[in-house]
Image (cartoon, grey):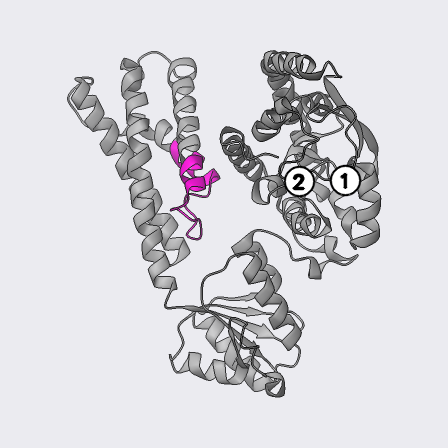
Amino acid sequence: MTSRLTGFALVLLDIFAAVAVFNLVSFARGVGAGHTVVTPLAAPIGAFILATYLVQGYRARTDMLSVDYASQHVIATIGALVATLLLTYVVFPAGYELQSSRFVIILSFVTLIPLSLGYRRLFYLRNVAAREGRSIVFVGDRQSCDDFREECRKMDVRQRIIYSVVVPDTAAPFGASEDGELRPFSAVLADIQEHRIAVEAIVLRESARELVPEVSRRLVQLYFAGVPTYTLELFHEIYWQKIPLYRLNQTWLFQEGFQIAREPMFERGKRVADLLFAALALVLAFPFIAVAGLAIWLEDHGAVFFVQTRIGKNHLPFRLFKLRTMHTEAAGAPYTLPGDRRITRVGRLLRASRLDELPQLWNVVRGDMSLIGPRAEWDRLVEDYERQIPCYHFRHLVKPGITGWAQVNYPYGANVDDTLRKLEYDLYYIRHFSFRLDATIVLKTIHIMLFGKGR
């Protein structure tokens, strides 16, 4: 089943399940006028579908079996429940049919959680079984095949991948200890056309200029026959939702996308949202900051806040505020490591829950940061990164954020290689910025905070 059909089928199932559950719960509770309720369910169903969409619950490549997705699905459903209650009892006028029972609304959403997760897992298992018989075909030179194989290893790709080279003389096999098969592309193409290989996607390295006209023509025929074909950059964006760093150069920004850079209204809208939500969050977070600050002081009688110079938008430095999580005399490596003795007992709890980040809300109110964006890096580290990483400065096109796409997709970075990996996600965010993507990041951040995945 194609990705689009899977998403469409899941939307229909969600609508049917929501209508059935709400009506069954209403009937069991003896609520309602004895008829099937449909139209008044537009609001809760819409909220549920939107929240599920934001946690990528309609994306065929989302791992529906993972604990991470299950928790995000639960969080999204609870968010839809809260939105439905607010709409029902605050926004909608008296007489709205669902106002007859809060319990019915709550119980219906609670029932939807295992039901909607259940059929998603069935769909995912079916898609996995279908993919097991299909291969990804990579086309490039020998070096790009090696690079793509290493990238697939890092991304934990378990699907069969056929590596092919456009120059047959370079099709020497991989070493005996290495995974994958390497073949001339002309031979692979013949197998595809004769249906000896079932293909999920063909991935073309952009520099594969050695393709002879006849091979190019056959490749075009396959593309228009429905075989998904991607450039390597597009494959990274669609499958892994990041930007491959090999594509970066000084003209990269002039491609499609980058609404936030080209349309000032996006940035102004984001600033208004940042100011409103950060001010409200700061008021709500104040008791937590106060209690955490007292715990920090009681442990070693040191300073409550940690202040450090970070680099913001347009490379402007600013003073970032966090709750202190390390001993006051701590020194050494700029990165923390698992079991780092410099971290206090209170600090370990604050880092795991990310509550140490709450004072950064003040940086958002001041305009130094956004709620969502690339991580604000220490000025000393930025100097090193800009010497070692070409085009690293692109991440300073937007304000840094308390959370962001890289933060929710990649663990804490502890070296330059981790910084390179996180940069790929940062650049994806900059290129594809949208309020929908921001909402997705918020839900994923809640999941990280609840399950103590910070460091």
Q: Say which element carries label 2.
A: loop
Nearer to us in this view, 423 or 224: 423
| Rendering coords of residue 305 (x, y %) | 73, 19
Query: Which residue is labeled 2 in the image?
Result: 337
- Taking the image as drawn, is residue 141 in sight? no
Residue 231 image-quadrant placement: bottom right
Q: Which mark is drawn over residue 391?
A: none
Q: How many marks?
A: 2
Q: What is the crowding at mark 2: few (fewer than 14 residues within 10 Å), some, or many (at least 20)?
A: some
Query: Which residue is labeled 1 in the image?
Result: 333
| Rendering coords of residue 320 (x, y %) | 76, 27
Q: Look at the image and give the residue range highlighted in magenta.
A: 48-72
Left or right: 383 as drawn, with respect to 11: right
| Rendering coords of residue 25 (x, y %) | 22, 24
Amino acid type shown at disc 1: Ala
The answer to the question of whether label 2 and label 1 lie on touching residues, with beta carbons closer than 8 A, is yes
Q: What is the crowding at mark 1: few (fewer than 14 residues within 10 Å), some, or many (at least 20)?
A: few
Q: For the view shown, which residue lies furthest in the bottom direction?
A: 169
- Taking the image as drawn, is residue 105 in sight? yes
Left or right: 303 as drawn, with respect to 211: right
**Which residue is at a point 24% across and 31% down the rendered structure image?**
21
Rounded to the nearest angstrom, the CA distance separating label 2 from label 1 is 9 Å
Residue 215 image-quadrant placement: bottom right
**Which residue is at a point 32% across and 39% down the rendered structure image?**
116
Left or right: 90 as drawn, with respect to 17: right
Query: Which image quarter is the N terminus in?
Result: bottom left
Q: Is residue 370 above or below residue 391?
A: above
